[in-house]
Amino acid sequence: MSKPKVYVHRMGSWYNLYMDKASEALLGSFVEVVSDGTRETPMSPAELVERMRGCSAILSLGGGGSHEITGDVLKSVGTVKLISIAHWCEQLTVAAKEAGVTVTEGSNANTVAVAEWTLTAALMGIRRIQMFDKALKNKSPWGEPRLEVGMLSGSTVGIAGLGRIGWYCAKYFKTMGAKVIAYDKYYTKERADKLGVELVTLDDQMKTADVISLHLPVTPETKGMLGAKEFALIKDGAVFINSARAALYDEKALIAELKKNRFTAFLDVFEKEPLPLDHPFRSMENVVITPHIAGFNSTMLLRCGREAIETLKDYFAGKGIRNMQYSQPGG
């Protein structure tokens, strides 16, 4: 019996970040692979149709080159039934919808990476790890005051946005023993109860939570939603975390409130990237910054590729189409 054919679209120099020899061997063990993975140059519709001829599925490693796979291309091929996405690519889902092709989020690795960074930031902020490190390196014998720290267990964590990353973070924080409250206008009470979180208003979240973490997309409704009024509501000693986008708030208003030294911020995204060398965040003691790497690392990229391949393997083994978008932590 012949193996089904799977097409791997071009990723150029990024291909080897998603695919190692072990993943290539796994994919080749259950399908016939047609790969343009390392290709850099663009492809014409006719060339794509010819390359994908007879393929049952597409392995989408990321966004590179995927804009070439249009709805018309998929219709012309006619045999593609499934696209397994390793690293989210919205434009490919639009093409698939036009052609009636099923798309599944084959990997959850990026979500997990961001959630891990968020949990790390919360723990560091609550326990003041970076403050003690600096004090001891500055020759303070004990880094006093040593007792003015909290614990994540028993604290209140506010999550703004219960999409895939916010949902996963809620699971993590609950596992750590925190109470989780959330602001999400489009989340139902039934879903929130099932997740074990309490829905609150944005203002209530800002003034109640010991840890506030942003996980909203940037839309006309959310752009600039946090300003001076909202930042003034944050409790003294709280931890403010942003691994989403800086466009969610007025950065100048955040800087002004942080200068009062009332709370700590852990930021992975900024209004201008890379962060200008003279930006105030680079010198503020109550701000911890990272260079937009919350969800980006070599382990994550390889795991994205691997999980998307395992999703295809299950599909061709008759186990159905799984969606990794809301897979359980540790599962």
Image (tube, rainbow, N blue to C red):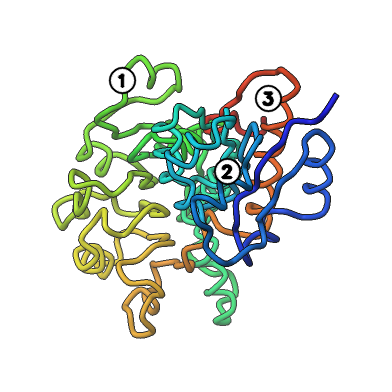
Label 3 vs label 2, nearer the camera: 3
Residue 274 position, x and y percent, is: 41, 75
Q: Badge 2 local density, few (<14 within 10 Å), some, or many (20+)?
A: many
**Which residue is disc 2 drawn over?**
112
Give the quarter of the image for residue 196.
top left
In percent of the image, x 78 and y 47: which residue is there? 23
Image quarter of the C terminus: top right
* 16 lies left or right of 114: right
Q: Position of residue 144 (x, y in %)?
A: 50, 67
The residue depicted at 34 percent of the width and 38 percent of the height is 161
Q: Are marks 1 and 2 in contact (CB under 8 Å)?
A: no
Where is residue 224? Give x, y as percent.
19, 54
Secondary structure found at label 3: helix
**Of callouts 3 and 2, which one flags the residue occurring earlier in the amino acid sequence?**
2
Q: Amino acid at mark 1?
A: Thr
What residue is shown with label 3?
315
Q: Is residue 94 above or below residue 231?
A: above
Specify the amino acid type for callout 2.
Val
